[in-house]
Image (cartoon, rainbow, N blue to C red):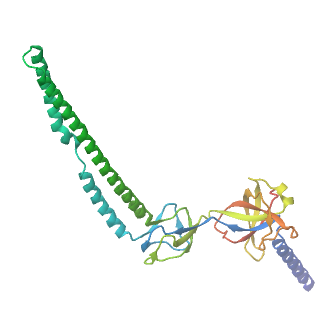
């Protein structure tokens, strides 16, 4: 009986040893690297006190989502002042039709008089001097009309230029008001929050860092001999290293292969440790929520 128990115990221990060895067997790989994502540091585009800033690290944001704003009271008041100013400027414009109406009426009357005089002259009822006088009067009135029209046009053009300059200032202030809103440039997760509500922001000051972690990029390095095994769009196996021989397997696609070699980075080991020059590659992997920036992974080029 004891002999059977001993044999059974030996069998169990042997099986556990085999299972443990299988679980911890080495993962075959052709290259190794670390995960990265496109990180964007969102900076302030306005100066002033941060009045609202509703984000926390780890929060998911949508592209264009407004997360806060910076105090722009003085900019808004200046805009109102300029709007009032531009109304006053435009009110100075001269109504050309009203200004020249009197002269136009005098010219019309003089021309009618000319027709009457010409008829009388044909009948030898008057002398020619009266016709010459009315022609001279018409010429003088037309010169006055042209001169007045030119003056009005010049004045209105000057006022329009002044008005346009103010409109540009208003547009600039409107742009500043728009930039006072803090928005997310992309869809992604907030990685770092640099400021808090109530702090003073200045143009260029970092507010938060965001990255889209839905798709991660594995940057790895290969030797020149391995270049023949890879091409753009090729599917590969990626083994994400979670420590203590714990790996998760992912499908990846080669999205970029460097056209220039470089010296092996100190933090990266290639299969051929003696290789001095390597080529960087990027592999896109769909993130299931477990992959993190900076995590290491192995790559197997032979997808079966």
**Residue 70, visible in the rendered structure:** yes
Determine the residue positioned at 9% across, 17% down: 120
Instruction: Write down the quadrant of residue 165 in the picture.
Output: bottom left
Judged left or right of residue 179, residue 145 is left
Residue 278 lies, in percent from the top left, at 81, 64
Above or below, comparing residue 290 to residue 109 in the picture: below
Above-or-below relation of 112 to 39: above
190 is higher (above) or lower (below) than 117: below
The extreme top residue here reads 123
Tell me what residue is drawn at x 14 percent, y 27 percent: 134
Where is residue 213 drawn, in percent x and y? 62, 65
- List the single residue furthest toward the right: 3
Is residue 28 visible in the rendered structure shown here? Answer: no
Q: Nearer the viewer, residue 116 or 294?
A: 116
The N terminus sits in image quarter: bottom right
Count the marks: how many? 0
Residue nearest the observer in this picture, 30 or 109: 109
The residue sitting at the left extreme is 125
Where residue 39 appears, x then y in whole percent?
61, 67
Location of residue 250 (image quadrant): bottom right
Q: Nearer the viewer, residue 288 or 36?
A: 36
Relative horizontal placement of residue 58, taking residue 292 as reference (left or right): left
Q: Residue at x 14, y 23 (%)?
A: 131
Task: Answer left or right for 60 relative to 32.
Answer: left
The answer to which quarter of the image holds residue 259 is bottom right
């Amino acid at each position: 009986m004891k002999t059977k128990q001993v044999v059974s115990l030996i069998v169990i221990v042997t099986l556990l040893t085999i299972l443990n060895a299988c679980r911890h067997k080495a993962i075959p790989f052709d290259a190794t690297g670390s995960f990265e994502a496109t990180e964007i540091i969102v900076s302030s585009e306005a100066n002033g006190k941060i009045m609202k800033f509703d984000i926390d690290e780890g929060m998911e944001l949508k592209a264009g989502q407004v997360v806060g704003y910076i105090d722009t009271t003085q900019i808004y008041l200046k805009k109102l002042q300029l709007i009032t100013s531009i109304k006053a400027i435009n009110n100075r414009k001269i109504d050309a039709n009203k200004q020249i109406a009197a002269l136009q009426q005098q010219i019309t009357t003089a021309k009618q008089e000319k027709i009457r005089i010409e008829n009388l002259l044909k009948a030898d009822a008057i002398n020619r001097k009266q016709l010459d006088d009315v022609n001279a009067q018409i010429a003088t009135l037309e010169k006055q009309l042209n001169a007045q029209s030119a003056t009005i046009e010049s004045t209105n053009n000057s006022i329009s230029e002044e008005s346009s300059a103010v409109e540009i200032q208003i547009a600039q202030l409107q742009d500043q008001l728009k930039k006072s809103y803090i928005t997310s440039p992309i869809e992604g997760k907030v990685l770092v929050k640099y400021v808090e509500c109530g702090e003073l922001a200045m143009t260029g000051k970092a507010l938060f860092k965001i990255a889209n972690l839905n798709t991660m990029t594995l940057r790895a390095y290969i030797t020149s001999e391995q270049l023949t095994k890879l091409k753009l769009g090729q599917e590969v196996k990626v083994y994400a290293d979670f420590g203590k021989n714990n790996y998760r397997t992912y499908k990846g696609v080669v999205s970029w292969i460097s056209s220039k070699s470089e010296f092996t980075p100190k933090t990266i080991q290639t299969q051929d440790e003696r290789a001095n020059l390597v080529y960087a590659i990027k592999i896109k992997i769909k993130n299931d929520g477990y992959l993190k920036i900076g995590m290491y992974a192995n790559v197997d080029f032979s997808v079966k």
